[in-house]
Image: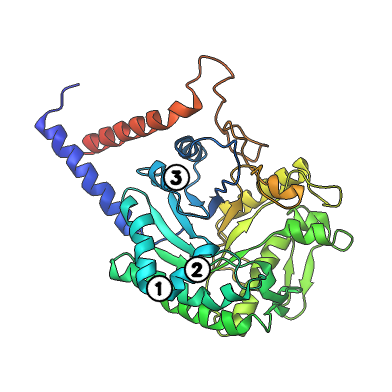
């Protein structure tokens, strides 16, 4: 196919346009309300390029990974999918020593992939406060500050958010939602972290799992309340609010805890939530039916772009755990069965995604491995055509 000089001009204009769009949207770490965690502790997962194809087919625009794997970051180049990368817990002590350590890490794991890969955030550690390693509690803030300072020096701080997701272990209690407080031993570390995140505009990220709450106390928790199904719900006498699902109650519990320590304006984003499709005998509720019900109802709830009873104007956003089952994860059986998709790209159960047809199904289908490049080629051609037509 021959290109005229005018066509070349349009291609050049398209490139400038796309870079501008990325820059304008870059300071937003979340597009829409729905994201997925892409965990990779497994030996049977598709290639990162195939994963990009799967995400595009499912219209999933937000992804979190737990490291800064170069193969993954390269595969996401040009996809437009917003990705939060992780600075793993084992690096925190070293990064906390000085800004130069953070600078080196960013120059190796972030900067080379910009602007093609839409890295919109760095999660510094995962579930540190409330965990068992007190040394990590002590270095978390310094590590986060060093990462932010390095980004600022490189001119990237406006486009890449610095955060740190927490588990429910940071709370002393969370029922009813209005009574939620941070643990006394966590507070001396949490308060200065919140102060810093408040200054740089970072939300509070919480890993909220109704599944874990139900699994730990199935006798006293209504399964329908945990699954967004019809149920009497709970009433919070202090706020006079009614909750018909545990997910929103957990989010509002976080808002209540933040309010008590002076951060009532801080947004809460759920960095992990999900439901296991299989578990051990003592893991109540871990079934395919319940996993499908929870994830389907959660997705419907998030797509409404509404707030919670306590924060009705603050649109709820969440990353679902997880994209695939991770067959090498340690712990109880449930840990290895949170996936929405199978390794061949087909759906684990139907929550509204189509997935991809496995290459072995029939020879008339393009192989899963090869779809990625084709998708990018077709998308780019369509974009150029649209731009030309517009002119």
Circle on res. 72: 3
Circle on res. 92: 2
SS class of the residue under badge 3? Answer: helix
Q: Position of residue 145 (x, y in %)?
A: 42, 75
* Left or right of residue 196, residue 256 in this image: right
Query: Does residue 265 show up?
Result: no
Q: In the rendered view of the protein, which quadrant contains the N terminus? A: top left
Choose top left, top right, bottom left or bottom right for residue 95: bottom left
Q: Residue furthest right?
A: 219
Q: Which mark sits nearer the N-terminus, 2 or 3?
A: 3
Q: Position of residue 97 (x, y in %)?
A: 43, 75
* Left or right of residue 114, residue 182 in this image: right
Is the residue marked by circle 2 packed among few (<14), some (14-19), or many (20+) residues within 10 Å? many
Q: Residue at x 60, y 78 (%)?
A: 258
* Left or right of residue 78, residue 298 in this image: right
Q: Residue at x 46, y 56 (%)?
A: 85
Q: Residue at x 36, y 34 (%)?
A: 376
Residue 93, placed above or below residue 219: below
Q: Which mark sits nearer the N-terminus, 1 or 3?
A: 3
Q: Which residue is mark 1?
A: 146
SS class of the residue under badge 2? Answer: helix
Q: Position of residue 7 (x, y in %)?
A: 16, 33
Q: Considering depth in this image, is 173 or 59 the residue closer to the camera? A: 173
Residue 229, placed above or below residue 345: below
Residue 153, placed above or below residue 336: below
In front of the other: label 2 or label 1? 2
Circle on res. 313: none
Q: Residue furthest left?
A: 5
């Amino acid at each position: 196919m021959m290109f005229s000089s005018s066509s070349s001009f349009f291609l050049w204009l398209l490139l400038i346009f796309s870079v501008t769009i990325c820059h304008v949207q870059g300071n937003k770490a979340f597009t829409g309300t729905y994201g997925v965690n892409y965990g990779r502790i497994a030996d049977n997962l598709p290639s990162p390029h195939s994963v990009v194809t799967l995400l595009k087919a499912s219209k999933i625009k937000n992804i979190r990974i737990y490291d800064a794997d170069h193969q993954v970051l390269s595969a996401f180049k040009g996809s437009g999918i917003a990705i939060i990368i992780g600075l793993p817990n084992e690096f925190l002590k070293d990064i906390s020593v000085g800004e130069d350590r953070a600078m080196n890490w960013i120059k190796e794991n972030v900067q080379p992939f910009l602007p093609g890969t839409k890295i919109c955030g760095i999660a510094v550690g995962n579930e540190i406060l409330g965990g068992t390693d007190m040394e990590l509690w002590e270095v978390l803030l310094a590590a986060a500050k060093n990462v932010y300072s390095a980004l600022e020096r490189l001119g990237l701080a406006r486009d890449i958010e610095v955060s740190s997701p927490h588990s429910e272990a940071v709370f002393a209690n969370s029922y009813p939602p209005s009574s939620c407080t941070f643990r006394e031993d966590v507070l001396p570390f949490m308060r200065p972290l919140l102060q810093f995140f408040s200054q740089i505009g970072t939300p509070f990220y919480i890993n909220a799992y109704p599944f874990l709450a139900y699994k730990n106390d199935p006798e006293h928790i209504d399964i329908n309340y945990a699954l967004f199904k019809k149920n009497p719900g709970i009433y919070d006498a202090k706020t006079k609010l009614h909750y018909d699902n545990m997910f929103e109650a957990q989010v509002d519990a976080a808002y209540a805890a933040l309010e008590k320590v002076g951060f009532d304006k801080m947004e809460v984003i759920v960095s992990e939530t999900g439901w296991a499709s299989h578990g051990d005998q003592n893991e109540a509720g871990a079934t395919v039916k319940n996993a499908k019900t929870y994830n389907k109802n959660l997705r419907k709830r998030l797509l409404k772009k509404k707030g919670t009873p306590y924060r009705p104007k603050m649109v709820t956003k969440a990353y679902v755990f997880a994209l695939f089952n991770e067959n090498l994860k340690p712990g109880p059986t449930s840990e290895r069965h949170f996936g929405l998709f199978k390794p061949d790209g087909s759906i684990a159960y139907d929550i509204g995604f189509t997935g991809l047809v496995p290459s072995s199904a029939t020879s008339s289908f393009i192989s899963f491995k090869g779809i990625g490049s084709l998708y990018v080629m077709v998308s780019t051609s369509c974009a150029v055509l649209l731009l030309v037509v517009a002119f």
